[in-house]
Image (spheres, rainbow, N blue to C red):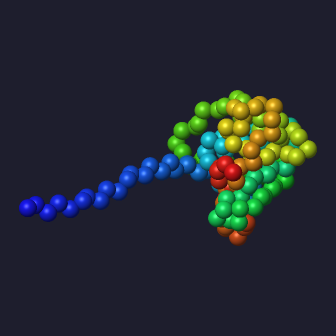
Amino acid sequence: MINVQPIKVQPIIQVEVAIMGSLTYDRVVVEFEDRMLAHLQLVIIQKLRRGESFLLSWRDAAVVGDGRSSAWMHPAIPLYFKFAGGHAPSINPNWVAQLTRSANSAQGLVVTAEESAAVDANAAGKIEPAIGIRAAAQARATKASVTER
């Protein structure tokens, strides 16, 4: 008689890892997915080129307290965008339009998911958890992540 032992098989779990870039503003570093950062860059630079100040708000990632953060964006304060990926992402004009409407509102630019731009271009988007906060050299830092709630 042959003794047969069952074989334990571990399922393969495929995890999608987002390429995280960063926005550095007045010694605060906020990490966003590269695709989101590219869309935010277009809207932010458009406002600052016109000399307009505005509020930028996002949801913080759970690793930094799962709260909300905001920064007052002003043309006189240096701004640095750092993309982690080697290629520029394609731009979704509907998402840019939604972010631009938000930036021009009294509430300011609220970081929202791309999916919300496709659902209804006229509706308010879902607030995305911000990129997590991490310390920059002798400064505060923020880290945001895009996860839907």
Residue placed at 75% from the left, 48% from the top?
127
Rendered view: 77 above or below 46: below
Left or right position of 5 against 72: left
Name which quarter of the figure residue 130 lies in: bottom right
Residue placed at 29% from the left, 59% from the top?
8
Left or right position of 66 against 47: left
Q: Position of residue 43 (x, y in %)?
A: 76, 38
Name which quarter of the figure residue 106 lies in: top right
Residue placed at 71% from the left, 38% from the top?
116
Residue placed at 44% from the left, 49% from the top?
14
Is residue 64 visible to the viewer in this orientation of the structure? yes
Is residue 45 visible to the viewer in this orientation of the structure? no
> Which of the pair 106/141 is nearer the observer?
106
> Which of the pair 88/15 is nearer the observer?
15
Q: Residue furthest right?
A: 106
Q: Residue furthest left?
A: 1
> Which of the pair 83/56 is nearer the observer?
56
Q: Position of residue 22 (x, y in %)?
A: 65, 52
Rendered view: 132 above or below 115: below
Q: If the image is split into quadrants, where does the N terminus sit? A: bottom left
